Amino acid sequence: MSVKAAVVQKPPVLLDREATMARAVSSLQEAATAGAKLVVFPEAYLPGYPTWIWRLRPGGDMALSGEVHARLHKNAVDIDRGDLAPLCEAARKHAVTVVCGMSEVDGRYSGTTLYNSVVTIGPDGAILNRHRKLMPTNPERMVWGPGDAAGLRVVDTPAGRVGALICWESYMPLARYALYAQNIEIYVAPTWDCGEAWLATMRHIAREGGCWVIGLATALQGSDVPADFPSRDTLFKPEDWLCDGDAVIVEPSGKIQAGPLHREKGILYGEIDPARAARARRSLDVTGHYARPDIFRLDVKREPMPPVTFS
C-alpha cells in the first residue's frame, strides 16, 4: 500500500529556533491536510543551515564568526530540554511520521558542542531515532562536532522502514551499506547539496540499495536571511540563490518519480510504495546474495561516544 510523502524545502527563519519551529509545524499541517503520512525537512532546518561558513574567510572574520556562532548555539535544539516538543506534538496530532534535520546541543554533557543531527519522529509523537552526522564537511567542522554510529539505524514506521544519512554521508559507502543491511525501504538524505551531480547520487543510491530515496535541501535566497543577521548586507545579496533546493523522490529502480523542485520554496509530494523496495532487490541485493559474506565483513560500533570524565 502506498503512502503520500511530503518533502518540505521552504526557508527557515535563520538563527531563530522558535520562529522556524512555527514554520515547520505550519508546513507539517499543510502537508497532512494534503494527505501526507511522511513529512521530511532538510539538513539543519532548525534553526537553519549555517550557510555563512561558505562565505567567511577560513581563519579570518573571527569576531563575526564568533557572534554568529553564539546565536546559532543559543537557538540550537536541546531535545532533553523539550525544544522538539512542538514538532513531536504536531506529528502526534496529525498522525504523520516526520524526519527533520537540526543543529543539536546536548545539555547532558558540556552543553557547548553542536551536532548536525536528524531525528525520526513517529505518528504518536515519540522520537524513534536520532542520528548525528559522522563527519562534518569542510568548514562545517568549525560548527559541528563529529557524531557516532548510535543512530546509524533504520526504524519501523507506518510509512515503511526509514533511515537517514546527512548530506555527504551519502558519499560514505560503508555508512550507506550499514543502512542497506537493515532492510531499509525509504532512505532520506537531508542535505545542503543540489544540482545534477547530487541528483545523480540520489538515483545511484536508489538503484544500489533497492530503496526509495528522498533527497532535499532548503531553497534559500539572500532575501530570506533575516534583516538582523550580522553583516547580512555584506555576506548576502538579496537575489542570490544560496541553495537551489532540488527536492526529489526516486523510485527503487533509480527513476525519478517526483521533482526535482528547483528554486521553488514549497512542498514536493509523491506516492511511495514501501513493498517495491523488496521487489527491487530480487536481482540485486547488495547485503544479500550480492554481499559475498565469505569475503567481506562490516562491523559497526554502535555504542554512543562517552562523555569526557575527570577523576
Image (spheres, rainbow, N blue to C red):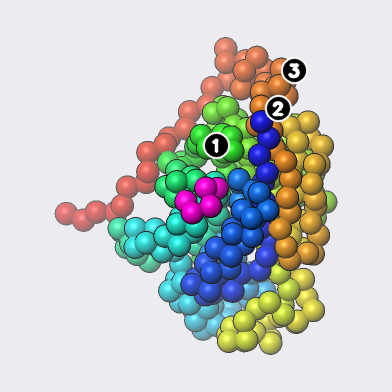
Q: How many neighbours does mark 2 have within 10 angstroms: few (below 14), some (14-19), or many (20 or more)?
A: some
Tell me if label 3 and label 2 are in contact, CB under 8 Å.
no
- The answer to whether residue 93 is magenta is yes
Which residue occupies 37% across, 46% down?
305
Image location of residue 297, percent across then percent down:
54, 22
| C-alpha span from label 1 to label 2 | 15 Å
**Furthest residue to the top?**
294
Q: Along the polypeptide, which appears first: circle 1 or circle 2? A: 1
Q: Indicate which label's residue lies in the foreground, 3 or 2.
A: 2
Q: Along the polypeptide, which appears first: circle 3 or circle 2? A: 2
Depth check: 206 or 292 in front? 206
Q: Indicate which label's residue lies in the foreground, 1 or 2.
A: 1
Q: Is residue 233 above or below residue 145?
A: below
Residue with the mark numbered 3: 283
Tell me if label 1 and label 2 are in contact, CB under 8 Å.
no
In which image quadrant can residue 80 be found? bottom left
Which residue occupies 73% across, 54% down?
268
Asked whether residue 104 is in view, the answer is: no
Tell me if label 3 and label 1 are in contact, CB under 8 Å.
no
Q: How many neighbours does mark 3 have within 10 angstroms: few (below 14), some (14-19), or many (20 or more)?
A: few
Name the chief secondary structure element in magenta.
helix
Which residue occupies 72% across, 62% down?
266
Image location of residue 189, percent across then percent down:
64, 47
Residues rendered magenta in the picture: 92-96
Residue with the mark numbered 2: 276
Which residue occupies 62% across, 81% down?
226
Residue with the mark numbered 1: 158
- The answer to whether residue 285 is magenta is no
Q: How many neighbours does mark 1 have within 10 angstroms: few (below 14), some (14-19), or many (20 or more)?
A: some
Image location of residue 178, percent across then percent down:
55, 32
Tag 3's secondary structure?
A: loop
